């Protein structure tokens, strides 16, 4: 008899009560896990996984048409066609395999606190590190929270049958054949974003913080809420956890979240996690001092970072992978940690800023101020580059990802229109900005086999230069003027900490070549947006 999603939920919900399951405390899990890791120079532990990135191309959503993916590869279709047989086999297996079960809570608020139940097969005992890492990421279990979300890991599932089965409507996810921790972290967040949407919120792949900054025009101290949107490796965590050089008396940065928040119609956000999952490649103290301080705490758990026989850590060595990671603790940000992981409604702050971090390497301005329509277009375009954290085979390629969020379940158009409604409803208190961390001036040659050869790399702004742009926004020191290419408002004056003239595309291209690249960018954007039927017309028009 075929399995239904409800059958699956009933079976999975009963796993933790089985005699082959151990329920361990976070302290017990830590003691069991750490012998399988390498001790670092700071006293923290580094674990090495066999699979070193998310298996996005092997992830399938199962359920009604409301949750099915728009586009599936041949392999994903095969997984979908056989999901009932696969799950039946998994359920037979986990009735006999040694399992560890742990429950944690996502979020700290009175309205929406998903209970997250992780069940891991420890047929290979070192896999208890996955349970240890989820304890460091989420909060202590609160039994009254809801909904209950289940994630079942079977790392030893045959490699040739690796797959991630997501049943969002019953809050169950299976991770089969992968021991990469990112599958657990994003698995719980993906289900929570779907549940948040059912409650009238939007689950956003975004970092958050609150800032106190002096308005240099009025001398008034402003309270500002900030959200940073961006794919892995574009700068989301970097700028969510940066002080932007705000050093005037009374100025302060208070870090709330680095990855996923739930946006309410009034502009408030609910946070999710206590542990931040940073990408470690190139981490250094000068441009990322707050992150470096937190990451080098003994409380951090590293994954796939190069650690030598003496415990020395080399964040620049990508021999194992370009997707080295670390779960660092929010508490280790010290005085830069916000009191709450949530941010207040737009009506309770002077400004609420949405910053979309994009990676366009040719002619898009480094900083632009957006209209509500342009902001919603930026949400739908999700312009970025693929990283080793998503699909290593496509790392460096330009991509579009709605909401810069690879974890959307359900209609992308509905999310874009809802985001646009929220922005318009809150009026001038919500402001949108585009921050291009990709730089300008790149020249590429398309090869016959379909890949790209970079003839001249882009001139990239440093982290501190991008921070200078944001500092000028926060302190309201920018004179804005409209540019002709994309209709954006861009800085007309000099900005302390960055030579904007050095990033003018006219320095890198002839006028004919620059115009060709502008037209190409606009055509690409319009083609992407026009595929979404029922998207608000003003959003599409803004890309013209």
Image (cartoon, grey):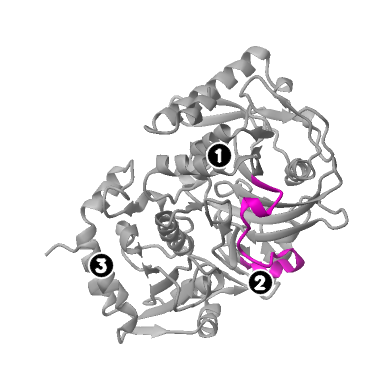
Q: Nearer the viewer, mark 3 or mark 1?
A: 1
Residue 282 position in % (x across, y down): 67, 52
Which residue lies most toward the left here? 1
- At 55% across and 39% down in the image, what residue appears? 424
Q: Residue at x 56, y 51 (%)?
A: 266
Residue 424 got which mark? 1
Which region is colored magenta?
Answer: 328-353
Tell whether label 2 touches label 3 (CB within 8 Å): no
In this rendering, position of residue 135 left or right of residue 460: left
Q: Which callout, 1 or 2, points at the residue further toward the start of the chain?
A: 2
Residue nearest the viewer, comparing 453 with 136: 136
Instruction: Give SS at disc 3.
Output: helix
Q: Is residue 16 left or right of residue 268?
A: left
Distance CA(mark 3)–CA(mark 2): 41 Å
Q: Is residue 393 above or below residue 131?
A: above
Asked if residue 332 is among those painted magenta in the image, a careful observer would answer yes
Disc nearer the start of the sequence (3/2)? 3
Q: Looking at the figure, which quarter contains the N terminus? A: bottom left
Residue located at (47% from left, 71% from top): 130
Query: Which residue position holds label 2?
Result: 40
Residue contact at pointers 3 and 1, CB within 8 angstroms? no
- Decide which of tag 3 and tag 1 comes sooner along the chain: 3
Q: Which residue is mark 3?
A: 8
Element under disc 2: loop
Rate crowding at label 2 as few (under 14), some (14 to 19) or many (20 or more) other CA atoms within 10 Å.
many
């Amino acid at each position: 008899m075929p399995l239904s999603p409800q059958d699956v939920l009933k079976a999975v919900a009963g796993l933790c009560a089985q005699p082959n399951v151990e329920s361990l405390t976070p302290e017990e899990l830590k003691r069991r896990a750490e012998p399988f890791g390498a001790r670092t120079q700071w006293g923290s532990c580094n674990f090495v996984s066999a699979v070193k990135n998310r298996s996005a191309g092997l992830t399938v959503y199962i359920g009604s048409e409301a949750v099915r993916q728009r586009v599936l590869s041949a392999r994903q279709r095969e997984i979908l066609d056989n999901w009932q047989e696969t799950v039946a086999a998994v359920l037979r297996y986990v009735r006999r395999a040694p399992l560890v079960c742990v429950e944690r809570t996502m979020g700290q608020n009175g309205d929406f606190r998903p209970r997250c139940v992780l069940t891991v097969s420890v047929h290979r005992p070192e896999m208890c590190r996955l349970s240890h890492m989820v304890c460091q990421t989420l909060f202590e279990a609160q039994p009254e929270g809801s909904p209950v979300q289940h994630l079942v890991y079977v790392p030893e599932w045959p490699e040739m049958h690796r797959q991630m089965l997501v049943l969002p409507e019953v809050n169950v996810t299976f991770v089969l054949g992968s021991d990469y921790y990112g599958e657990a972290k994003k698995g719980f967040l993906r289900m929570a974003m779907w549940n948040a949407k059912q409650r009238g919120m939007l689950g956003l792949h975004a970092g958050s913080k609150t800032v106190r900054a002096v308005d240099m025009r009025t001398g008034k101290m402003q309270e500002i809420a900030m959200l940073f949107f961006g794919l892995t490796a574009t700068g989301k965590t970097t700028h969510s956890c940066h002080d932007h050089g705000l050093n005037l008396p009374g100025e302060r940065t208070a870090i709330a979240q680095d990855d996923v928040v739930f946006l309410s119609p009034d502009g408030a956000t609910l946070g999710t996690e206590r542990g931040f999952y940073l990408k470690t490649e190139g981490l250094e103290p000068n441009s990322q001092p707050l992150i470096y301080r937190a990451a080098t705490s003994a409380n951090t758990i590293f994954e796939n970072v190069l650690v030598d026989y003496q415990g020395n850590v080399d964040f620049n060595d990508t021999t194992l992978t370009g997707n080295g990671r670390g779960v660092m603790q929010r508490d280790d940000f010290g005085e830069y940690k916000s009191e709450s992981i949530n941010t207040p409604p737009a009506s309770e702050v002077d400004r609420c800023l949405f910053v979309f971090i994009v990676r366009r390497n040719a002619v898009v301005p480094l900083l632009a101020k957006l209209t509500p329509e342009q902001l919603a277009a930026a949400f739908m375009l999700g312009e970025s580059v693929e990283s080793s954290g998503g699909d290593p085979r496509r790392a460096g390629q330009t991509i579009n990802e709605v909401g810069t969020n690879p974890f959307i379940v359900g209609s992308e158009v509905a999310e874009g229109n809802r985001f646009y409604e929220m922005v318009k409803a809150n009026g001038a208190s919500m402001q949108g900005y585009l921050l291009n961390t990709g730089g300008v001036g790149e020249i590429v040659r398309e090869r016959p086999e379909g890949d790209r050869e970079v003839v001249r790399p882009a001139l990239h702004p440093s982290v501190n230069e991008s921070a200078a742009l944001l500092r000028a926004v926060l302190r309201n020191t920018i004179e804005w003027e409209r540019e002709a290419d994309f209709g954006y408002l861009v800085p007309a004056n000099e900005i302390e900490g960055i030579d904007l003239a050095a990033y003018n595309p006219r320095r890198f291209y002839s006028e004919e070549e620059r115009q060709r690249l502008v037209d190409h960018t606009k055509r690409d954007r319009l083609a992407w947006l026009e595929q979404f039927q029922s998207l608000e017309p003003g959003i599409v028009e803004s890309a013209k």
